[in-house]
Image: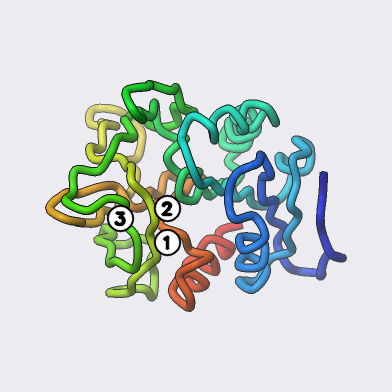
Amino acid sequence: MADATAPVAGRPTVAVLDYGSGNLRSAVRAVERAGADVTLTSDPAVAETADGLLVPGVGAFAACMAGLLEVDGERIIERRLIAGRPVLGICVGMQILFGEGIEHGVRTAGCREWPGVVERLQAPIVPHMGWDTVEPPEGSRMFAGLEGERFYFVHSYGVRRWELDVEGTSFRAPQVTWTEYGGDRFVSAVENGPLWATQFHPEKSGDAGRRLLENWIATL
């Protein structure tokens, strides 16, 4: 399935992966406003060849992984990354990039692009819902021009420990952004070469979210 308007010369192309999860229309509109031509698609050929791929996601980790596998999404993501083609995961679309998710005692394998476990937040009030700040690393391209800005979150689960260790290897360490909430701490964004991801929703984060999407589109 594809949903697109006529492309505009000089604008990068972005495929929003339709696998039955996520705020698809709001994601499409947000990326269009940020300066890209957007196609909503579950077609692997379209998803693999677009300049950028956005992987949305809301709801349960297991349900998102099941939907992703139905459209061969795990393979699409892997093939793009092997070719150095940019991918952006949002909310559960970020969580499924990790090793596994645990919900109500059930373990579900993720895409394993990064080791780590998506687990319930250890805060007095869950879900974490509303606007919050982030702690990006120095030199972040994702958060360029966004110092001190707030982003919109709505989630009960997150990655509370970063487990990828590249010390002693030739690999460059990913840039990891954190957020504090209710005495707990979780990964709120990752920049890892062509693979970027956010726990918050840029498409619901107003001007700050638009600037972040513009920063991503500038890498395409």
Compare residues 102 and 185 and report the one nearer the observer: 102
Q: Is residue 22 visible?
A: yes
Task: Give whichever of discs 3 and 1 has the lower sequence position.
Answer: 3
Residue position for label 1: 142
Task: Point out residue 219 in the picture as x, y percentages from the top left corner.
Answer: 55, 59
Measured Cα–Cα span from mark 3 to mark 2: 15 Å
Instruction: Give the residue type at disc 2.
Output: Thr
Is the residue under label 1 in contact with that under label 2 (CB below 8 Å)?
yes
Q: Can residue 115 be seen in this view?
A: no
Residue position for label 3: 128
Residue beneath the point at 64% across and 73% down: 33
Residue extending farthest right: 6
Residue position for label 2: 198
21 relative position to 13: left or right: left
Q: Which of marks 2 and 1 is in front?
A: 2
Depicted 136 relative to depicted 48: above or below = below
Depicted 127 relative to depicted 132: above or below = above
Task: Point out residue 144 in the picture as x, y percentages from the top left corner.
Answer: 39, 69
Determine the image quadrant of residue 159. top left
Measured Cα–Cα span from mark 2 to mark 1: 10 Å
Task: Point out residue 185 in the picture as x, y percentages from the top left corner.
Answer: 19, 49
Instruction: Give the residue type at disc 3.
Output: His
Measured Cα–Cα span from mark 3 to mark 1: 22 Å
Residue beneath the point at 32% across and 62% down: 139
Compare residues 155 and 54 and report the one nearer the observer: 155
SS at mark 3?
Answer: strand
